[in-house]
Image (cartoon, helix red, strand yellow):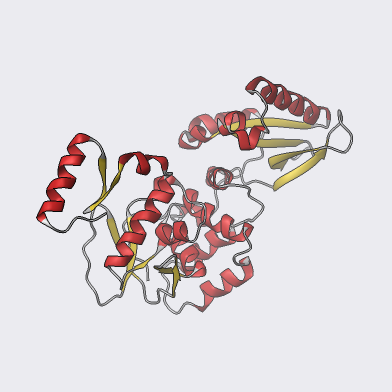
């Protein structure tokens, strides 16, 4: 809700003090119990739907558009809200709103909200966001079949004015629809930047204990001597989320994972485990990967030239 009249404002202010209502954006309020049940991306969608009603000329772009398109996006990139404006319009960035001058916003309407098209959204994500986070919506769009990589790269080439075109193109070219979730996409991007580019994704190996079953690994590298090393990105959800545990107890999940790793070892596949928190600590992760003898090469020049993106930059 957005209170307009003095009486409404006073009522809302009193209920905020009482803890029944929370301020979720400038001028926007929600019932606390309802709001806290929403995940961060759904909270952003609520805010954008409200802002879109009050600012009908606004076109949301970048990470904000990706969220409205239903693409995976890191919670860390969900704020501030990103809005596309014409180059002739001067708009001052705010703590909660970031404006971007785009020559062609290529708008579509989703749930009553104007956002950039899927192709323009992915281009802007590649341009605006750090590489680690840009890869998630790109992979998601490819995985969902929303666009092909060929069409996406052709769209980049068709844009008449695009800063750092080659860098943006390189980021988009890294997209891979085989990545199963945003966490794996982030991990793959971090590994790429660290100089451990993944050789293959989602590789299956036959189970030795149960014929007909297979064990699938997130990442796979082939060492110079021909031996294999697999990478797994683990998280709490893997052991706690009912949708991922099939109703099994934590001990059963842990035992099954131990059996799976032993089966892979017998197949000649070594294993290195990574956790989401490791992505924020490259030094520790590098040491673990080196100990596992994961093949490494020095980062390429396209990575060194600023693939991590530039915060607060307007992109044409």
User: Is residue 97 shown above or below 150?
Assistant: above
Residue 111 point in image, percent of width and height = 44, 65
Is residue 81 found left or right of 120 in the rendered image? Answer: left
Decide which of 164, 242 is in the foreground and name it. Answer: 242
Q: Which residue is drawn at 76% across and 24% down?
A: 259
Q: Residue furthest left?
A: 6
- Could you tell me how many numbered marks the image carries? 0
Q: In this view, does 201 lie above or below 97?
A: above
Q: State left or right for residue 22 relative to residue 74.
A: left
Q: Nearer the viewer, residue 196 or 242?
A: 242
Locate the N terminus by quadrant.
Answer: bottom left
Q: Which residue lies furthest to the right in this view?
A: 211
Q: Relative to residue 296, is residue 64 drawn left or right?
A: left
The answer to whether any part of residue 163 appears in the image is yes
Considering the image in quadrants, where does the C terminus appear?
Answer: bottom left
In front here: 227 or 220?
Answer: 220
Does residue 26 lie above or below 168 as drawn?
above
In which image quadrant can residue 100 be found?
Answer: bottom left
Q: Is residue 233 visible?
A: no
At x 74%, y 28%, the residue is: 261
Q: In which quarter of the image is residue 35?
A: top left
Residue nearest the viewer, comparing 197 with 39: 39
Q: Quadrant of residue 87?
A: bottom left
Residue 278: x percent and y percent?
Answer: 51, 33
* Residue 244 percent location from the top left of the image: 64, 36
Q: Is residue 131 left or right of residue 79?
A: right
Residue drawn 20% across the image and 40% down it? 16
């Amino acid at each position: 809700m957005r209170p307009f009249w003095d009486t409404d404002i006073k009522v809302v202010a009193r209920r905020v003090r009482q803890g029944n209502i929370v301020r979720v954006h400038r001028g926007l309020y929600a019932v606390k119990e309802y709001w806290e049940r929403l995940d961060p991306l759904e909270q952003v969608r609520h805010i954008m739907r409200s802002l879109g009603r009050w600012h009908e000329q606004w076109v949301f772009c970048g990470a904000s558009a990706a969220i409205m398109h239903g693409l995976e996006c890191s919670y860390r990139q969900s704020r501030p809200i990103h809005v596309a404006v014409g180059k002739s319009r001067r708009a001052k960035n705010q703590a909660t709103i970031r404006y971007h001058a785009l020559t062609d916003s290529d708008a579509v309407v989703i749930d009553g909200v104007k956002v950039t098209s899927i192709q323009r959204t992915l281009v802007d994500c590649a341009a605006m966001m750090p590489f680690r986070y840009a890869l998630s919506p790109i992979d998601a769009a490819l995985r969902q079949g929303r666009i092909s990589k060929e069409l996406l790269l052709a769209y980049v080439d068709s844009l008449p004015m695009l800063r750092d075109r080659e860098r943006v193109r390189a980021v988009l070219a890294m997209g891979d629809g085989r990545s199963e979730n945003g966490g794996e996409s982030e991990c793959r991007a971090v590994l790429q930047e660290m100089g451990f580019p993944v050789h293959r994704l989602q590789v299956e190996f036959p189970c030795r204990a149960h014929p007909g079953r297979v064990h699938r690994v997130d990442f796979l590298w082939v060492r110079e001597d021909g031996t294999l090393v697999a990478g797994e990105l683990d998280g709490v959800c893997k052991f706690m989320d009912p949708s991922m545990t099939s109703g099994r107890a934590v001990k059963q999940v842990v035992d099954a994972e131990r059996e799976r790793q032993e089966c892979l070892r017998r197949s000649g596949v070594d294993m290195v485990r990574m956790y989401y928190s490791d992505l924020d600590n490259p030094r520790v992760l590098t040491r673990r990967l080196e100990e596992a003898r994961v093949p490494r090469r020095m980062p390429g020049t396209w990575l060194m030239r600023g693939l991590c993106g530039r915060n607060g930059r307007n992109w044409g």
